[in-house]
Amino acid sequence: MTNYDDRIGITTTRRSVLRNIAHQLIPLLIGGTLLAGQLPDIATGADDTPKLVQPLSVKRVVSNGRHNAFAAFTKWKRDYWLCFRSGTGHGSTDGDIVVLRSSDTKTWTEVMRQDVQGDDRDPQLLATPKRLFLYTNSRDAGFRVFANHTDDGRHWSKPQPVYKNGFILWKPLAHGGKFYAAAHRPGPNNRRHADLVTSTDGIDWKLASTIRAGQGESETTLHFLDGNRLVGFLRSQVTVGGFLMESAPPYTRWTQRPAGHHLSGQSAYTFAGVTYLISRELRYTPPVPPSTLRVNVASKVSQATMVFTFQDGELTPYCRLGPLQGNHDSSYATAVQVGNEMLVVYHRSAHEYSGATRLKDAAELFLARVPLKRP
């Protein structure tokens, strides 16, 4: 077994400065349909972020020269469980899934390394009182979702295919005795779509509704608010900014509005009465508004991981993780609440950003302690 520890040390990020918010009510036209109920269009680029909370500490968890990224993190049966993709590079085809276990988040032990097929990436964890599920989105000729599980933390079932070929299962969660997840299909923008899928056993997933289709849909993170109201935070491959999708039981009809911020690799949680979204932050020079079509962006971009609060239907920057400068691949963050803090695992890389995935580059995993906001 391989031991991972925090001997590299603890760092802290600097406070950012006050921002000036530029509100622009710009109509957004996608696929010939005018979207109503838009949020103010906040420019993405200048250092215009409001005063942010600082993380209490940041430490490296995995740093070995490989591209270690796209993590899932949870607490189950008194231990912390962290899984991630480890490959030669962001876009390489040799990724495997590594599962680590820790009792204190200081010393980590590798308990499993899984090679399902081709490039295994974007692992997802779903913890229930008796069982821990691991979902692997495996890319070979196309994408295929595999699931396996453990009931004791030592013995794992054999991975088995679940749901449909060509889909990625994203951020499964439990609610009201059922499991929910978003499943999105990569491909050309006009053939992409994001679906709501449900399960009663974590293995047999069925289509419940289409969240959105034909407009460059990508990673869609689901979160329940106010009982049974379901919100989907949707990443767009068409515009710089993402979208907020909302639905009520039986979750067959969805409304949408711009999120006002870029969304990618995002996760959502409610801790101590406050809802948080953790996503990749993009900073363009010169700045561009979120409604900008991605094909029209010629600006230089830097990025970090941003913790947002989500209150009254709006995302507000709360805590930045990792510097914007010298950081060109980041986020895919995942979090666990511990007392009055959240523990956030995210990745970052300093390789030069070229607008395309890299076949050989390195990324490190970090764990940050972030104080919770009082409700």
Image (cartoon, rainbow, N blue to C red):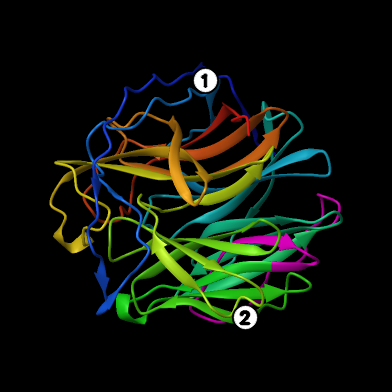
Mark 2 or 1: the one toward you? 2
Q: Residue at x 87, y 56 (%)?
A: 130
The residue identified by callout 1 is 8
Q: Is residue 264 left or right of residue 367?
A: left
Q: Secondary structure at mark 2?
A: strand
- Please provide percent x and percent y for residue 338: 71, 32
How many residues crowd mark 1 within 10 Å: few (<14), some (14–19), many (20+)?
few
Given residues 107 and 214, the one toward you in this image is 214
Between the residue at mark 2 and the residue at mark 1, the CA separation in whole angstroms equals 46 Å
The residue identified by callout 2 is 208
Quarter of the image for residue 20 reads top left
Given residues 219 and 248, the one toward you in this image is 248
- Please provide percent x and percent y for residue 140: 46, 72
- Please provide percent x and percent y for residue 84: 56, 49
Quarter of the image for residue 191 reads bottom left
Q: Identify the magenta region.
A: 151-179
In the rendered view, would you say 62 is above or below 247?
above
- Indicate which disc, 2 or 1, sits on the residue closer to the N terminus: 1
